Amino acid sequence: MYETEDLYTYVDYICHIDTPRYKGLKIVPSISAMRDLMKHGKTLADAAEILENGHDAPRKRKKGVIERWADSGKKTFNAVAAMDYNEQAKEEVWVLVHFGKFTRKK
């Protein structure tokens, strides 16, 4: 009837990605933020690390938007995320809207 290989379905070969989280909610990148991450050679996990362990940015953001900074040598990395509702997943998520690097002033 069926060979052993035919018993496996495509579901067995799907890669399940463990999406990074911040405050219990998934972090999903915008297209612009994904370009920023690639430009700086960073991953979504790096952005999650900055959001989790970085310090608050001195500038104010509107309600539901956060900006966190992490110092690395003379450079500072910053991640900006906004809370949003994902219609497909039917859940609240953090949307990474910007990831950047700059040199701190003395």
Image (spheres, rainbow, N blue to C red):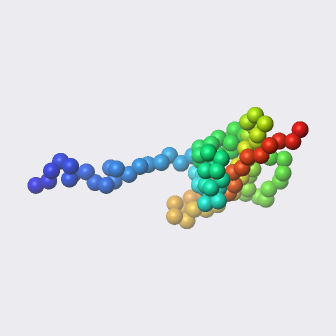
Q: Which is more toward the observer, 76 or 57?
A: 76
Quadrant hosting residue 28: bottom right
Nearest to the observer: residue 104 or residue 44: 104
For the point 51% across and 64% down, which residue is it? 88
Tell which of 11 and 93 is nearer to you. 11
What residue appears at the point 28 percent right and 54 percent down from the top-left corner?
9
Q: Is residue 73 left or right of residue 6?
A: right
Residue 42 picture location, percent across and down: 62, 45
Residue 45: percent from the left, percent from the top?
A: 59, 44
The residue depicted at 76 percent of the width and 40 percent of the height is 75
- Residue 56 visible somewhere in the drawing: no
Does any portion of residue 104 appear in the rendered image?
Answer: yes
Query: Quarter of the image containing the C terminus?
Result: top right
Tell how many labels: 0
Q: Residue 92 vs residue 61: left or right?
A: left
| Image spot of residue 21 (x, y percent) | 59, 46
Q: Quadrant of residue 103?
A: top right
Farthest residue, direction top:
73
Query: Residue 30: percent from the left, percent from the top?
Result: 62, 59
Residue occupying image coordinates x 54% and y 62%: 90
Query: Extreme bottom residue here?
Result: 87
Rendered view: 87 above or below 24: below
Q: Is residue 106 left or right of residue 82?
A: right
Q: Residue furthest right?
A: 106
Assign the N terminus to one quadrant of the image: bottom left
